[in-house]
Image: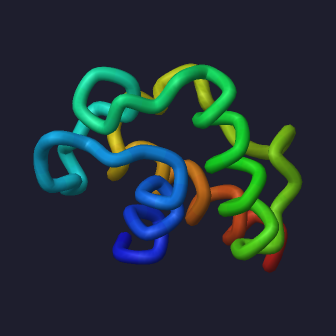
Amino acid sequence: MENIIDVILNYVEPDEEITGSSLLKQDCGLTSFDTTCVIGELCDSYGVDPSALDLRKVKTVKDLQQALETAAAAVAE
């Protein structure tokens, strides 16, 4: 999860510490553009195509981590 937080911190300077339960928009302060950039960068590092992510339920840092891990596991199969 640290790598996800590090990528987020490349785009924003939140008022509070980012944790797994931090909301991407409200707590981290990511705009739609920031979120797109973060997801693109993370997909590159996880080796997954962004279209493979189910982003409809992604609200928190942990949700994003789980979506990336699920997509990466599907690629590995």
Q: Is residue 31 above or below residue 72?
A: above
Q: Residue at x 12, y 45 (%)?
A: 16
For image coordinates 53% across by 49% down, the residue present is 11
Q: Point out residue 48 in the picture as x, y percentages from the top left corner.
A: 82, 62
**Which percent across, then down, holds residue 35?**
60, 35
Image coordinates of residue 45 in percent, x first then y, are: 72, 75
Residue toward you, 56 or 45? 45
For this view, does 54 lie left or right of residue 11? right
The N terminus - image quarter:
bottom left
Residue ID at (61%, 35%): 34
Q: Quadrant of the C terminus?
A: bottom right
Examine the rendered structure and indicate whether residue 77 appears above or below residue 34: below
Residue 28 x %, y %: 32, 38
Above/below status of 55 relative to 8: above
Task: Quadrant for residue 51, please give it.
Answer: top right
- Work out whether residue 15 or residue 54 is closer to the camera in this orientation and state it: 15
* Image position of 52 with respect to 32: above or below: below
Residue with the most extreme left position: 16
Locate residue 26 relative to residue 52 in the image: left or right: left
How many marks are shown on the rendered structure?
A: 0
Model colouring:
rainbow
Identify the residue at image location x=71%, y=73%. Answer: 46
Q: Nearer the viewer, residue 68 or 75?
A: 68
Horizontal side of 46 relative to 19 (left or right) equals: right
